[in-house]
Amino acid sequence: MNMAVENVRLTAIRFNLRVLGKGVWRDLKSINRYKVRLFGWLLSVTIGLASAFLFGLLFKFNPTTTATSGIESDQVFVFFAGGIALSTFADTAIWAPTNRVNRDIHFGTLEAIFVTPANRMMYLLSPCISDATINLVFFIPAYVLIMGIFGTLTNLYVIVTTLIIIIITIISAISFGIFFAMISILLRRSNAIAGFLNQLFMFLCGAYVPVQAFIGVHPIGGRILQYIAMVFPYTYCYDLFRFYTFGNSYITLIPVWIEFLLIAVATVGFLILAGFLLKVVEQRAKQKGLSIL
């Protein structure tokens, strides 16, 4: 009996992995078919780096930002370029599941996902993996350029640790993205909300301004913004990326080991929330029919 149950489980795992692989392959073929989208990706990375370069020429961090973060006033370009590089993958992981859900809602194909025996998580993971693969193609040249300008291209420790942080960011952001995808199914027509939240998270979590510098805006309001930002694992991914880029001179929000721990806890937490919302969606579909999707 136990052997039979084990065989069923192994078959289910193989089937779900096959669904995941097919989904990734389909997305990669689709991206290759629409080459304008590839050009858009490349253009986006180029514009982002050009903007970071201009910011580095035109702006300097004020003394408060330098004192609270440890970033020198002449390191603006590396700060923004690193943020853009990390955002490339974090945005993919966060918004790829939501974009897939919204696209299937638009074309009326979401119902098909809920009548198959495959795990719905595999459906949401496939666009994350395929988009991250494509982003990696454009990220590597940009990353090499950033490391070259910063003068750490030959520093293997910096390169390896920052790449590890990027992988951790993708994993943690995927859990956040699946959570938002479930919200999209429940609320429908959530593109405007998703766009607003995207910009809010980028600002709040440290893409444009070090979270440590919020205190310089207002002693109380800045501290409140810091506490809000520290709820999201995204914030610690930015913080750790810059810690391993700038070295020990960079002042992290909290001790490094605690940031790693909080990323893991938040990732698991958002996955649990996403799984709970998935059960809610499935229950509603059973009670009211697939038309609610």
Image (cartoon, grey):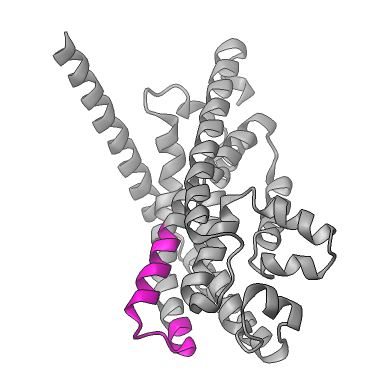
Residue nearer the viewer, 98 or 266: 266
Q: Quadrant of the N terminus?
A: top left
Give the residue at x 63% y 83%: 76
Q: Where is residue 24 in the image (x, y as percent from the top left)?
A: 36, 48
Please name the residue shown 37% across and 27% down the image.
118
**Front residue of this view, candidates 234 and 244:** 244
Q: What percent of the width, then of the height, locates residue 212?
A: 68, 67
The question of residue 51 being in magenta is answered with: no
Q: In this view, does 3 lie to the left or right of 86?
A: left
**Residue at the left extreme, as displayed:** 3
Task: Check the image and name the residue furthest to the front.
Answer: 255
Q: Is residue 150 magenta?
A: yes
Residue displayed at 43% across by 37% down: 123
Q: Measured along the vertical axis of the image, is residue 194 above or below residue 153?
A: above
Image coordinates of residue 250 in percent, x first then y, are 56, 75
Which secondary structure is most common in the magenta stretch? helix
Asked if one can make out residue 241 in the rendered structure from this viewpoint, the answer is yes
Q: In this view, does 67 lie to the left or right of 235?
A: right
Task: Give the magenta range.
Answer: 145-167
Relative to 155, residue 217 above or below: above
Q: Is residue 184 above or below residue 276?
A: below
Q: Would residue 75 appear left or right of 115 to someone viewing this image?
A: right
Q: Position of residue 191 (x, y in %)?
A: 68, 46
- Front-lying residue, 109 or 233: 233
- In the rendered image of this protein, does residue 80 appear above or below residue 116? below
Q: Is residue 70 left or right of residue 126?
A: right
Identify the image quadrant of residue 161: bottom left
Q: In which quarter of the image is the C terminus?
A: top right
Which residue: 71% across, 86% down? 60
